């Protein structure tokens, strides 16, 4: 009987300690969409995208015009081959410039997006951590698609125990 009572006390203690670990979830994507800064950031990024799109369109039109000019003289035997080659080289150079502009524009957009969104993400994460701590949550999971762990109480980290068990420093 004493054994049964001891086991019962151990089980109760285990359930009580497990009940104290609080886990929560939040859809961080939805939260970010609700923030007023998101609209401002979206407008800035859209303006930058439109600027790059305009530059690319102009370069494309220039390339097409040069191509049309080349097509008009390509079959004309009175135009020297050297002129045709120069015009063809111009078109090749314009196409390379277009591709480089595309690459530069994409990289610039990514950098700008990162510089605008990083502080917003940091603020959201800090706020979630503060709310979690204030309300006694040990873990907060991100319920948005592709989300993971946003906050965890370091007192529940098993790394030191596992490292000790494996004899690691």
Image (cartoon, helix red, strand yellow):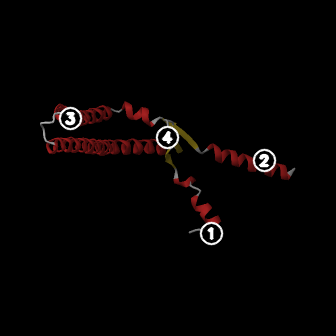
The image quarter containing residue 118 is: top left
Distance Cα–Cα, label 3 vs label 2: 87 Å
Vertical side of 80 occupied by 158: above or below: below
In the rendering, at what x and y percent does residue 87 appear? 17, 41
Is 135 or 42 nearer to us in this picture?
A: 42
Label 1: which secondary element: loop
The label nearer to you, 3 versus 4, is 3
- The mark nearer the N terminus, 1 or 4, is 4
Mark 2 = which residue? 8
Mark 4 = which residue? 147
Mark 1 = which residue? 167
Mark 3 = which residue? 67
Vertical side of 13 occupied by 43: above or below: above
* Crowding at mark 1 (Cα within 10 Å: few <14, some 14-19, many 20+): few
- The mark nearer the N terminus, 1 or 3, is 3
Distance Cα–Cα, label 1 vs label 2: 34 Å
Disc 3, disc 4: CB below 8 Å?
no
The image quarter containing residue 122 is: top left
Picture residue at 37% right of the left edge, 30% below the top:
34
Distance Cα–Cα, label 1 vs label 3: 70 Å
* Crowding at mark 2 (Cα within 10 Å: few <14, some 14-19, many 20+): few
Distance Cα–Cα, label 3 vs label 4: 49 Å
Q: Residue furthest right?
A: 1
Disc 1, disc 4: CB below 8 Å?
no
Picture residue at 32% right of the left edge, 34% below the top:
38
Distance Cα–Cα, label 1 vs label 4: 33 Å
User: Is 32 placed left or right of 72 in the picture?
Assistant: right
Is 61 or 24 nearer to us in this picture?
A: 61
Is 23 or 69 nearer to us in this picture?
A: 69
The label nearer to you, 2 versus 4, is 4
Label 4: which secondary element: loop
């Amino acid at each position: 009987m004493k054994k049964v009572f001891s086991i019962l006390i151990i089980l109760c203690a285990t359930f009580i300690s497990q009940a104290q670990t609080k886990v929560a979830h939040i859809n961080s994507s939805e939260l970010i969409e609700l923030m007023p800064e998101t609209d401002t950031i979206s407008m800035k990024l859209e303006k930058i995208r439109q600027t790059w799109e305009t530059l690319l369109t102009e370069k494309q039109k220039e390339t097409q015009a040069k191509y049309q000019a080349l097509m008009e003289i390509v079959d004309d035997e009175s135009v020297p081959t050297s002129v045709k080659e120069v015009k063809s080289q111009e078109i090749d150079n314009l196409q390379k410039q277009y591709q480089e502009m595309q690459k530069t524009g994409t990289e610039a957009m990514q950098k700008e997006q990162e510089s605008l969104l990083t502080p917003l993400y940091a603020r959201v994460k800090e706020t979630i951590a503060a709310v979690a701590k204030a309300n006694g949550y040990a873990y907060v999971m991100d319920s948005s698609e592709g989300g993971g762990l946003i906050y965890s109480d370091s007192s529940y980290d098993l790394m030191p125990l596992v490292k000790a068990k494996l004899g690691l420093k």
